[in-house]
Amino acid sequence: MTDDGVWKALADPTRRLILDELAQRGGQSLFEICVRLTTRHALGLSRQAVSQHLAVLEAAGLVRVRREGRYKFHDLNNEPLERIATRWLRPEPPKDSP
């Protein structure tokens, strides 16, 4: 996924909350994420809405999904965030310099 896709995924506050929850505790199912969003953030989103947000985050590479039987578990993937941060924090020297 391009950096633009990552930025677009991060633009939504609900998706950022989902990432916050996965950063605190990885390996959550859709049901667990829905419960945490409801109890900790008072968000009354449907499972379908949360699932759509997770799909955007997965497409951007920010969430990894693993299946165990009928269940899907979601984990935060820091690599796209690190790539974006590194772009400005540790820029590469210009290619034409010695």
Image (tube, rainbow, N blue to C red):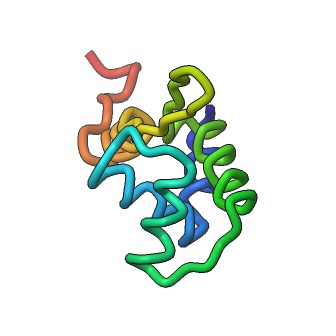
Q: Nearer the viewer, residue 65 or 59?
A: 65
Residue 68 vertical position relative to residue 15 in the rendered view, above or below: above
* Residue 26 can be seen in this image: yes
Identify the residue at horizontal 34%, vertical 46% (top origin).
Answer: 85
Q: Nearer the viewer, residue 2 or 56?
A: 56
Is residue 85 toward the left or the right of residue 80 in the image? left
Is residue 90 toward the left or the right of residue 50 in the image? left
Question: On the image, which quarter does residue 5 sit in?
Answer: top right
* Residue 4 can be seen in this image: no
Identify the residue at horizontal 50%, vertical 39% (top origin).
Answer: 63
Residue 86 vertical position relative to residue 70 in the rendered view, above or below: below
Residue 40 vertical position relative to residue 48 in the rendered view, above or below: below
Identify the residue at horizontal 67%, vertical 47% (top origin).
Answer: 56
Horizontal and vertical percent position of residue 61: 54, 35
Name the image quarter holding the N terminus. Answer: top right
Horizontal and vertical percent position of residue 88: 33, 47
Identify the residue at horizontal 42%, vertical 38% (top origin).
Answer: 75
Report the residue that reaches farthest toward the bottom. Answer: 42
